[in-house]
Amino acid sequence: MLEVVALSALTTFLLGVGNGAAGEIGKNLTLSAGALVRRTFGRETPLPAAAEDRRALAGQVHARLARDPERAGEWALMLGAAPDEAVEPSRGAMPPAPWAFTNQEKVLKRLLREADRSWEGRPRVVLLCGPAGSGSTSVALRLGAEARDRFPDGQYYVDLRDASGENGPEPAGVLLRLLREMDVDPDRIPATEAGRERLYRQLTEGRRALVVIDHTTSLAQVRGLVPATPDVLLLVVVSGPPLLLEAERVPVPPLADRHAKQLVRKVAGPEHAARIKAQLPGVLERCRGNALALHTEARLLTRDESVSASPTGASQDHPVRAAAHLASFRLGPEALRLCRLTALGAWPSVSATIAAAAADLDEATAARLLGEAADVGLLEPLPDLRYCFRPEIRRQLAETAAAEYGLGTCADAVDRVLEALLKLVLPASRAALPESWRTELPPEHRDTPSAVPDGIAVLAAEVANVARAVVVAEEHQRTDTALWLARSLWPLQLKAGFWDEVLPALRDAARHAEESRADDRMAAALHFQLAHCLGETGRWEQANRAARAAVTYERAAGHLRGEASAVELLGLLSLNGWSYEEAYERFTEAETVYRRIGPGEEGVADLPRALALIKRHQGRALRGMDRLDESRRSLKRAVDFFAGRTGAPPEAYNQARALTDLAETLHDGGDDPAALARIAEAEALLPASATPHRAYLAGLRRRCEAGTAH
């Protein structure tokens, strides 16, 4: 059997374990691998974090199998029955190139030259850079349009501009967005940065593809994307100073006057030729060859109104700001006030709800005024009736707001948006998890109507704004607002796997809870959420620190249910790292704390279900410790509870999970007929949409059937 378990196969398998597909089923595979590693060595072997350590572990396992044919057979079954990891990426879909693109042919030729040069082992990476509004995005999109035949296997475009912070998403978040552009199923996207980078390289190996990362703000965001294959071109687009990236550096120069005139005429159209002729000298002087400024002013020339205002102050020195200054005078005072006040918070996206709160208007009026602002170029439309500001335009509007309306009025506008976001996301959070104590509402919001049809959808649409709002609320000394906003994200991380998106908000809120000496229960809840998020993204040490902090805060608050839950999380972190003895100790400690909750005390209604989950976790830890009889008994108790046999309402999903665990334990103990029966029960409980779980059970069945054949 040894020839089946090649060292390369073992290495690939162990590199993927823990860094592989996210979610419960990815964890099941990790735990099964850990249990088999323990049986192979006869001792607990924690899961290595570094790739080199995993390669070393693969070598040690391979050497041991040479002396243990029976164990080699188990490994062969494990590797052979693992769910197929093959992922076929889509070809992607670049946004359309701008119709009025004008004279950047020299830049395009340099980009194509890099795509066509001899490989010679040198990665194809281009850093396309220019000042804000220079047209670097347009050049990238034009390259995609003109070079489709050069990249037949895929063109992938990722825009980082809509992230919640000034510095954009972290590297793991960039990889996540890119894999989504490749149409990788969410259940197949690894949770960790290392796993995502590994999958990205697998998907691009041997392919002729273009990868564009637009509005990049740091070297770290793209360092892991540098291709190691000859036919992939990575195009990194930066608005502003270039990054220190080892790449072919291609600046986007200002348009010469004759080409600037062409662009203005293309955008405005021949029917406005007379007005263009009269206004063109001033346009060219103000815009200085900046493509965005030229485009904005050309659109203004198509309107009948005449504006005599000239840029002043900082606007005189920046073409985009100058164009925004002129555009603002094409709006009525109400629309202009709305734009200025909405720009104050630097919100990643703007909806009618946010704009209405900022300007203290009704949403219908705000929606109409947003459309007017988009017509003159102050806002860019996004899907789902949302908009965004370009950074320089937003800054110009925000600075003008302070000068025009005063700091008090501006602060009130931001406060109204913060309050509107709270009223939007708190009921959505409660609707998404209506029975959970973690989605409790603050007293002042408990009378808020909570009829939210799809709470997860509302939270997903606003997650970037909520992350930004946590920072803004802290700046405005609204501590409670910042903390409750972050608390509202719990369903999004638990049910939808939005770990990368919520992590910045949780980090900020947990830190702020400590610095402000917030209520112990609030601090505990935020550290718990942070620990959960860090654990799901493979940041084990940070997760353990946050979970221990949650335990400390819950104990200080005298909140037994919260303390037990945080100790349970510590156990899960140990379990996922193959530290089975420690995990079992934590689960036992959590059970002890749960059982201290007396009749009539807070959390007593949740106790039966919490104890059933603890029994499931204990059973999984006992399996990893090779205490299979005890594992089977614990898991059987969990199955009975979730099947409704103890009087509780049945829970098909948790019953299927516990049955899967029980089947694993039975298989490890050699009782494959009983394991196959549990697999059939689990499959009958799962909906057709549970594709990853069904695939995992199919692999487990193959292992059990092979066992019965022997």
Image (tube, helix red, strand yellow):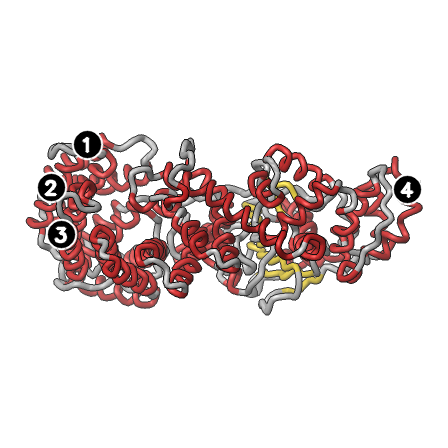
Mark 1 residue crowding within 10 angstroms, few (<14) / some (14–19) / many (20+): few
Res. 596 mark: 3
Query: Dot 2: what SS?
Result: helix
Res. 275 mark: 4
Residue 61 x, y percent position in the rendering: 21, 62
Question: Would residue 273 be found to the left or right of residue 586 on screen?
Answer: right
Residue depicted at 16% across the width and 43% down the height: 600
| Tag 3–tag 2 contact (CB < 8 Å) | no
Residue 214 x, y percent position in the rendering: 60, 54
Q: In this view, does 381 lie above or below 51?
A: above
Q: Identity of the amino acid at label 2?
A: Arg
Cα gap from disc 1 to disc 2, whole angstroms: 15 Å
Name the residue carrying label 2.
637
Residue depicted at 57% across the width and 46% down the height: 349
Name the residue carrying label 1.
649
Query: Dot 1: what SS?
Result: loop
Mark 4 residue crowding within 10 angstroms, few (<14) / some (14–19) / many (20+): some
Residue 484 x, y percent position in the rendering: 41, 50
User: Of the residues tagged 3 and 2, which is closer to the observer?
Assistant: 3
Q: Identity of the amino acid at label 3?
A: Arg
| Tag 1–tag 3 contact (CB < 8 Å) | no
